[in-house]
Amino acid sequence: MHLEYNIQGGDFSNAGTASSAIKKVLKQLMSNQKIIRKVVVALYETEVNIVAHAFSGKISVDIDVDKIIINAKDRGPGISDIEMAMENGYSTASDEVREMGFGAGMGLANIKNNSSKFEIKSEVGVGTELLIIVNLK
Amino acid sequence: MRIEEIVHLINGKVISGKAFLNKTIENGFASDLMSDVLTLDSDDIILITGLSNMQVIRTAEMSDIACVIVARNKNVSEQMVKLADDCDIVIIKSSCTVFKVVGELYKNGIKPIY
């Protein structure tokens, strides 16, 4: 099954609607709550990142028999130092993002923690792309 | 502990999810940092927070948190109540501080996750 959602940068009140829709689909397809939570937390962190940092983005989810593949691609400022961005505590988030309860520099590391495979590519001035795979077994 | 007992302990007001007051909760976590909440891997958590915005309810939804206590009578928007109702999440508003809510729950047997 293939799902796709467009995400608007800066749209804080709607941040999470795509993750919420995907969670509803997953709950119909599988019963392992821990796995669903892993996928959904990784998705939600990704969605918040796009809203917080990018102009726009697209999240696609492929649900397979043995894994879930998430691809998130945004148009935005990109990340100049990925290694630093992956470190806990490093953040370039705005005050607005911090007021929402984010921007502590924990998101990317948490996405990685919840995934079986994690890849990040970024080009400054172009955008960032994440590949997140969560194995179901 | 049943959510209904928690409501009494903190002199709270239930503003969403009234149908779920019989649910029992064992663990508590207090934070205004939703990024921190999202790193938890635990069931049956009650979240105590001083923050009141849509992302608090979204975070609860993603983390399977059944109940959120908003301390210090912070305003809870209609949009938050609607989302909480959609996700079967109980929101309790309390005039107590986060410190007082946490103290009361801890004293009465709600456990920390770590």
Image (spheres, helix red, strand yellow):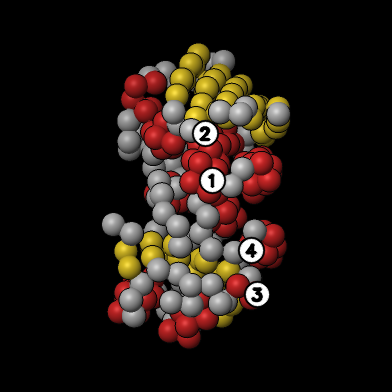
Give residue A12's position: percent from left, percent from top: 61, 45
Q: Earlier in the sequence, mark 3 or mark 4?
A: 3
Distance in Å between CA atoms under marks 3 and 4: 8 Å
**Which amino acid, by three-letter code, is at mark 3?**
Ala
Q: Quadrant of residue B86?
A: bottom right
Q: Which chain hosts label 3?
A: B
Residues at discs 2 and 1 in contact (Cβ within 8 Å): yes
**Which amino acid, by three-letter code, is at mark 4?**
Asp
Image disc number at residue A32: 1
Image disc number at residue B88: 4
Q: Are marks 3 and 2 on the same chain?
A: no
Residues at discs 3 and 4 in contact (Cβ within 8 Å): yes
**Which amino acid, by three-letter code, is at mark 1?**
Asn
Q: Are marks 3 and 1 on the same chain?
A: no
Image disc number at residue A136: 2
Give residue A45's position: percent from left, percent from top: 51, 39
Q: Which chain hosts label 4?
A: B
